């Protein structure tokens, strides 16, 4: 919806979001005050939301608030637009629910974890919050901090509409506790078409991760572009690249064994992927240690870099770039060796126990699992819906192709770098390993670190 | 310092050595101000401007913009307000407690007070990490917002917790600052007042407090900058985004838009503005405060 | 009981340890009338209330008199600082992790054993020591040099001093943001300056290259706190009587010799107090690293305070984080313990 209004100039785009972000912050401040006021004087019965639940007006002390507080990290770019589109749709269905929007920026998880954990520990959770499904949920499910929504939200119709693997990620401990809302693909290799044309490289004909290294060598020797845009300031980009290399070399079964914790049984395989990653890192920008991934991606757009390994959220940047069209200017192949694989990065919403607004939360989760929500949210977010019955008309060429790939894929493994594959403590430990590896490229130390992480 | 002055006269080529001295002093000025100066210039540049010019250069024509300042102020204004709400009471209270404690442990001397004093002085140096986990447990257990049915408390629970925590951890340094000052107060004067029948409280109120104005200034300034500047307690103790203080907001400003150096720099100045103003106005007192805990 | 209170009341300025027993805290200034009445058999304490005779006041224990002043702040400090540290120690003996509550029923030193076999800890411990030593020594040297220069009876001394001290008034968050820009490999001032004077070969990715990370951090921290050392040393220099400069001059000592042989040895107290404060700042350098690197500075720059935060708040392994914190606390004690002792011996506490 708001795509059209997005300016083409990347800088202006970002600036617009600052302003929007500031506006949101201010709103939060105001809403936060009035919100607490309502809760404090126990007058929430007054709004009489819809009366379907008798517990609402009765006890002013808990439950009945029609204020829905959402904590999320979609604070910038297309993510923020997508989130707003989702809220717009929800407001249309539930105009009586007031949304208290609590963005916790800082990107992929870091800030939001502390915020949400503190509040959950304090017994003061938000109505719902954004979280990766799968293993990322386990600290919460271990302590029964998430409500079982198997009956209230996951009705028969919804279970049938979702893919089986995705439903499984929503029940890491048996009970359904989360509603996945989108699926990003992680094992993508984006490239600048004309750069590769000039260099005479055919990206569809790269023989596995090792073959990609050969392409990098060629590009490095014969052109003056950076073979691969990449950032090493935060460890996650290298971690996810290592995952793709590992799957590309060893296949998904070995990867499943790995995330099951059997690292030493795969010593050679793990080392091989690490070594190849170290080799790749010879072909990244010199300033990789001080840039963000999207800054690196600008080099792909400008033709200063050839490839980018990244989740398909990177495509959003291409769409907002001027004169940079899908297929003619940029394109994507599955990371070499992973063509039948759709490694998934998924976001979901949950129902924390001790919920300040059970009714509104349930309404929101029901909505998030609906066709309408996923049709509004995903085209803007640049992801595909986890429901299989969402019309794909609005999704554009690239996402439609991704969706096709998804349906034709043999397997949809979870991702370490994005929470679904391993418990948060292991993920954090692996982040540390790759933070070190980014600097030292020490395969032995990294292997030991990976073993110790599990 | 006529000694140092006379020393100068012994050095041959006095003028040349003075010139060299001032040259070195000015070079040091450049060293200490360079990060601020280049940050300041960058804050006025467009992204193209800061990518294509030297950091310390003035923004070229056409690459000058105030938008980074506007954005930074918008993004940080809520944090500025919260920081002020949190830091001002915490500063005043910790200074007051410090003054009382210093009076009780200095001017009313009693054998054995050294033991209490050691614990106060050691408290100055405790790394916050050593108390972080219990603190989160403690404040979660206290649950002010849940216990006190007032919207004002519930909405600002994070700020109140943070403020009280800063008071407690500020008391040791405040006590040390006040103590070094109170130790210079003439005991005979206090003794005379005592003989006149003044109680300890009267002496504090009538004699000590009026004498304390300068050291209060020093302590308030020092303590305000310390509390305002803290990040660690704030990220751990404040979980409600609407209670976020400015250091946390500033950190997120750079976390979410890594490459917007103009915005980061403008944000850094906006967040530092209160401490900079305090410093420029009261630099001398700040220096005293800094040297005071030595 | 009355006689014990009486004994305490009449004891000169509370010379006994028993003054600190809790029951002594009960009678405050306001209740002295009552206690004095208890001991009314003593003729010298006949006076009661606010109009008590000077003699009666003199006999009152200064301990009781002072308690209302230092008691409440002391309670806060003991609870929040020492109580919390004790609590932290107990937590470090549990196996607490995750979002539940700690289980205090089974305590063990397992977390400390785990520290010893954790390569992250070894690296963080080593870096913390390097940071402490290098940062402290370099800041002291720079601070001393600047102080000596400022002490040469210069014009607008206050202005110079104010500028040199300015960075210290800034938050670590602010200075970290400035320095991340200074160290930016493509546009940062450091590399631009190196290129400007033809030293292109020396340009580095300062904050990304593990070889330079820690040094870059130390340099930035030195920038921020050497001004503090300057202020402390300046006070020390000003306290040295000018006759000493004279004497040295008459002996024909050179300026360098004068400072090296005569002046600097007398600055030991300044050095010590500045060093202690620097060490504390170094231990608290968390904010600076956290802003630059988040929770993962990498093993080349990781320090204990960052590791503690990472383990406790990112991995929610509370007990392990508490154990790291206890090591950090022990390091602090190792530095300030001797300092406090020396100060105590000198009667300068």
Image: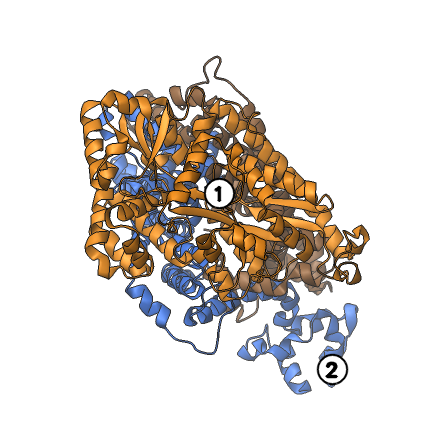
Say how many tags the image has: 2
Q: Judging from the image, what is the letter of the chain drawn in blue?
A: C
Locate residue B147: give its quadrant. bottom right
- What residue did someone put label 1 on? A106
Crowd rating for badge 1 (residues with CA inside 10 Å; few <14, some 14–19, many 20+): many
Q: Nearer the viewer, residue C342 or C319?
A: C319
Q: Does mark 1 fall on the same chain as mark 2? A: no
Q: Nearer the viewer, residue A292 or B7?
A: A292
Q: Nearer the viewer, mark 2 or mark 1?
A: 1
- What residue did someone put label 2 on? C43
Q: Circle 1 marks a residue in which chain? A: A
- Secondary structure of the residue carrying tag 2 is helix
Please say whether residue B233 is visible from this viewpoint. Answer: no
Q: Judging from the image, what is the letter of the chain drawn in orange?
A: A
> Which of the image's four quarters has the N terminus of chain C?
bottom right
- Distance, label 2 to label 1, CA atoms, is 74 Å
In the image, is A349 to the left or to the right of C96?
A: right
Q: Is residue B46 above or below residue C247?
A: above
Q: What hue does chain B carry in this figure? A: brown
Relative image position of residue A94 (x, y in whole percent): 70, 45
Relative image position of residue B198 (x, y in whole percent): 72, 62
Please say whether residue A310 is visible from this viewpoint. Answer: yes
Crowd rating for badge 2 (residues with CA inside 10 Å; few <14, some 14–19, many 20+): few
Q: Circle 2 marks a residue in which chain? A: C
Describe the colour scheme in one phrase: by chain
Relative image position of residue A249 (x, y in whole percent): 24, 47
Q: Nearer the viewer, residue A388 or C277?
A: A388
- Secondary structure of the residue carrying tag 1 is loop
Q: Nearer the viewer, residue C52 or C199?
A: C199
């Amino acid at each position: 919806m708001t795509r059209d209004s997005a300016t083409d100039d990347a800088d202006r785009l970002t600036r617009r979001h600052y302003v929007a972000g500031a506006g949101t912050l201010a709103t939060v401040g105001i809403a936060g005050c009035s919100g607490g006021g309502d809760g404090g004087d126990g007058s929430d019965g007054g709004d009489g939301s819809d009366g379907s639940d008798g517990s609402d007006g009765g006890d002013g002390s808990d439950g009945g608030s029609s204020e829905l507080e959402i904590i999320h990290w979609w604070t910038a770019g297309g993510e923020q637009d997508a989130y707003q589109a989702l809220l717009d749709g929800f407001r249309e269905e539930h105009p009586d629910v007031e949304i208290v929007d609590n963005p916790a920026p800082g990107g992929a998880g870091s800030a939001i974890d502390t915020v949400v954990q503190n509040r959950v520990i304090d017994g003061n959770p938000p109505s719902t919050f954004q979280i990766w499904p799968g293993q990322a949920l386990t600290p919460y499910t271990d302590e029964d901090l998430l409500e079982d929504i198997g009956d209230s939200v996951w009705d028969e119709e919804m279970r049938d509409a979702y893919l089986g693997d995705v439903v499984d990620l929503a029940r890491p401990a048996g009970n359904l506790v989360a509603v996945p809302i989108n699926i990003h693909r992680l094992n993508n290799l984006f490239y600048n078409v004309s750069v590769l044309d000039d260099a005479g490289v055919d990206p569809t004909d790269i023989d596995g991760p090792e073959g990609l290294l050969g392409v990098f060598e060629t590009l490095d020797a014969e052109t003056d572009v950076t073979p691969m845009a990449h950032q090493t300031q935060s460890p996650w980009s290298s971690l996810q690249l290592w995952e793709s290399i590992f799957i590309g070399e060893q296949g998904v079964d070995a990867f499943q064994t790995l995330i099951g914790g059997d690292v030493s049984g795969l010593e050679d395989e793990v080392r091989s992927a690490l070594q190849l990653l170290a080799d790749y890192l010879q072909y990244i920008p010199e300033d990789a240690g001080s840039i963000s991934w999207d800054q690196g991606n600008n080099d792909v757009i400008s033709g200063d870099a050839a490839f980018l390994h990244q989740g398909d959220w990177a495509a959003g940047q291409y769409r907002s770039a001027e004169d940079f069209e899908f297929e003619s200017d940029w394109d994507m192949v599955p990371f070499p060796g992973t063509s039948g694989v759709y490694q998934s990065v998924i976001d979901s919403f949950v129902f924390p126990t001790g919920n300040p607004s059970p009714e509104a939360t349930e309404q929101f989760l029901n909505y998030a699992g609906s066709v309408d929500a996923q049709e509004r949210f995903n085209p803007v977010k640049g992801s595909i819906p986890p429901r299989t019955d969402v019309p794909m008309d609005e999704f554009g060429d690239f996402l439609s192709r991704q969706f096709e790939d998804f349906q034709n894929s043999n397997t949809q493994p979870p991702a370490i770098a994005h929470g679904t594959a391993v418990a948060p403590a292991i993920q954090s430990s692996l982040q540390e390993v790759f933070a070190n590896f980014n600097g030292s490229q020490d395969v032995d130390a990294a292997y030991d670190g990976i073993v110790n992480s599990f | 310092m006529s000694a140092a002055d006379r020393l100068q006269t012994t050095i041959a080529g006095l003028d040349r050595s003075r010139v060299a001295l001032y040259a070195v002093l000015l070079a040091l000025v450049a060293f200490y101000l360079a990060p601020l100066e280049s940050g300041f210039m960058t804050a006025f540049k467009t992204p193209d401007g800061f990518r294509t010019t030297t950091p310390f250069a003035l923004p070229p024509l056409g690459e000058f913009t105030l938008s980074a300042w506007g954005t930074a102020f918008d993004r940080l204004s809520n944090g500025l307000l919260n920081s002020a709400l949190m830091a001002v009471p915490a500063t005043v209270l910790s200074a007051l407690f410090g003054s009382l404690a210093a009076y009780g442990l200095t001017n009313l001397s009693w054998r054995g007070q050294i033991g209490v004093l050691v614990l106060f002085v050691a408290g100055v140096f405790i790394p916050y990490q050593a108390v972080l986990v219990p603190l989160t447990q403690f404040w979660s257990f206290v649950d002010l917002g849940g216990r006190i049915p007032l919207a004002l408390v519930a909405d600002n629970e994070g700020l109140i917790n943070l403020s009280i925590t800063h008071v407690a951890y500020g008391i040791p340094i405040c006590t040390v600052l006040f103590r070094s000052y109170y130790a210079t107060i003439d005991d005979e004067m206090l003794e005379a007042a005592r003989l006149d029948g003044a109680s300890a409280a009267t002496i504090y109120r009538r004699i000590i407090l009026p004498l304390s104005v300068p050291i209060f200034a020093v302590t308030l300034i020092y303590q305000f900058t310390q509390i305002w500047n803290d990040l660690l307690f704030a990220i751990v103790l404040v979980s409600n985004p609407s209670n976020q203080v400015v250091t946390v907001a500033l950190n997120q400003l750079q976390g979410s838009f890594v490459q917007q150096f103009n915005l980061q720099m403008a944000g850094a100045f906006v967040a530092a503005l209160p401490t900079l103003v305090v410093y420029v106005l009261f630099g001398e007192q700040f220096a005293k405060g800094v040297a005071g805990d030595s | 009981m009355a006689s014990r209170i009486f004994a305490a009341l009449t004891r000169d300025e509370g010379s006994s340890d028993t003054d600190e027993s809790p029951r002594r805290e009960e009678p405050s200034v306001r209740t002295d009338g009552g206690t004095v009445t208890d001991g009314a058999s003593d003729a010298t304490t006949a006076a009661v209330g606010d109009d008590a005779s000077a003699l009666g006041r003199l006999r009152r224990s200064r301990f009781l008199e002072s308690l209302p002043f230092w008691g409440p702040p002391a309670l806060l400090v003991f609870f929040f600082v020492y109580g919390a540290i004790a609590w932290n120690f107990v937590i470090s003996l549990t196996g607490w992790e995750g979002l539940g509550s700690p289980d205090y029923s089974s305590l063990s030193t397992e977390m400390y054993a785990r520290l010893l076999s954790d390569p992250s800890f070894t690296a963080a411990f080593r870096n913390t020591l390097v940071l402490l030593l290098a940062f402290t020594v370099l800041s002291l040297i720079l601070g001393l040099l600047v102080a000596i220069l400022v002490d040469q009876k210069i014009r607008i001394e206050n202005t110079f001093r104010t500028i040199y001290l300015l960075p210290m008034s800034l938050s670590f968050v602010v200075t970290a943001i400035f320095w991340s820009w200074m160290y930016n490999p493509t546009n940062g001032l450091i590399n631009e300056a190196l290129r400007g004077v033809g030293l292109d070969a020396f340009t580095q990715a300062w904050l990304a290259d593990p070889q330079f990370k820690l040094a870059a951090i130390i340099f930035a921290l030195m920038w921020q706190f050497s001004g503090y050392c300057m202020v402390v040393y300046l006070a020390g220099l000003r306290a040295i009587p000018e006759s000493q400069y004279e004497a040295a001059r008459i002996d024909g000592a050179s300026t360098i010799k004068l400072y090296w042989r005569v002046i600097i040895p007398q600055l030991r107290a300044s050095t010590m107090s500045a060093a202690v404060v620097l060490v504390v700042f170094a231990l608290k350098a968390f904010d600076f690293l956290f802003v630059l690197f988040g929770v993962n500075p990498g093993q080349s720059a990781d320090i204990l305070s960052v590791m503690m935060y990472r383990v406790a708040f990112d991995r929610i392994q509370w007990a392990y984080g508490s154990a790291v914190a206890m090591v950090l606390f022990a390091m602090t004690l190792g530095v300030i313990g001797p300092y406090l002792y020396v100060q105590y011996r000198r009667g300068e506490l």
